[in-house]
Image (spheres, helix red, strand yellow):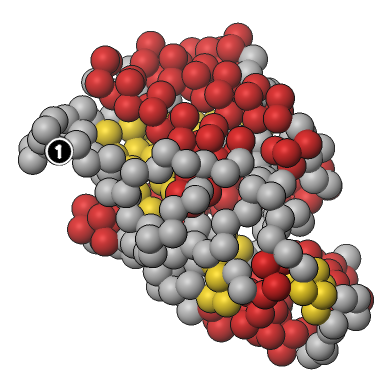
Amino acid sequence: MRILVTGTAGFVGAALAQRLLARGDEVWGLDNHNNYYDPALKEARLALFADHPGYTHQRADLADAGAVNQAFATFRPERVVNLAAQAGVRYSLQNPQAYIQSNLVGFGNILEACRHGGVQHLVYASSSSVYGANRKLPFAVEDAVDHPVSLYAATKKANELMAHTYSHLYGLPTTGLRFFTVYGPWGRPDMSPMLFADRISRGEPIDVFNFGNHSRDFTYIDDIVEGVIRTLDHPAQPDPSDDPMQPNPGTSAAPYRVYNIGNDQPVQLLRFIELMEQALGRTVEKRLLPMQPGDVPDTWADVSALRRDVGYAPSTSIEDGVARFVAWYREYSAH
């Protein structure tokens, strides 16, 4: 298949592009290489597959409608995976405009290009952050998500609403995937696994927010990619049991779906740090601090809808995942 993937220099995008190329798909990658974190890491990820004969790379910003339309006109993708976004909850408190441009304007450009390009299926990254102030655990796609606690989360919820409109009006099959704390090799340096690994390696203290009472549904990168591919191969269908008197936020009378992709196994943050310390062979001081604005205390994915519809749920244990991540981290940081 011809698959256009946005964000291919990013953590999930690079891993996905490699898997699609390995199974014989043609991939057109679109990424703006912004400097939200070290662009050298993005270049290193890209170098793993940039010279593959089935791969074409375009440096462009999603908010540039002309560039997006040109990519679609040239490549004529059959399916699209939108992973490019301005990421990070805490950064959205400092630079809200970046989120408006990338996550709203940019996503609007992708929807329009999919509509006019006759795309068979659009899969896009949403986020566990949409659950916001919800405290009912585990988080299920059937739950209402109307109380985001960061602008990042609000833009992701907006993406789901925008996608539904296009599914309803134009019959564009769309599937939103709410990722839960993704970690693993080639991960983002602004996320806790990489921050913890850096600090533990250097013997520096770790800031632990919410006094260590956070739990996160850490999900290993390979499991996320497998979930993306399974849903990509399974275009969203209208829900025959849709009842407008009792709407289900996860499905619709339109070809629209939303799924959680998480491990369904929340891990206490202090336990995660302990596993990192064991793998790295040293312990460090933990500074217990209050919760930060925009953070949520706990995340836990109910993945029953994903399991039901595509027969898949993540399964990498936290012990295996951390061991694989640390093995990669040691090799990468030695360069």
Residue 330 percent location from the top left of the image = 79, 75
Q: Is residue 47 visible?
A: no
Q: Is residue 309 above or below residue 262?
A: above
Side (left or right) of 153 relative to 209? left
Residue 92 at what x, y percent from top left? 70, 38
Q: Is 302 left or right of 100, judged from the image as shown?
A: left
Query: Residue at the location (44% across, 53% down)?
Result: 134
Is residue 310 or residue 5 the one in the foreground?
310
Residue located beneath label 1 in the image: 246
Name which residue lies at 15% across and 38% down.
246
**Residue 335 in the image, given as x and y percentages of width and height:** 88, 65
Instruction: Quarter of the image for the N terminus: give it.
Output: top left
Residue type at the position of mark 1: Gln
Q: Quadrant of residue 188?
A: bottom right
The one of 253 and 312 positioned closer to us in this rendering:
253
Relative to 320, residue 220 above or below: above
Residue 297 visible in image: yes
Left/right of residue 226 with respect to residue 6 in the rendered view: left
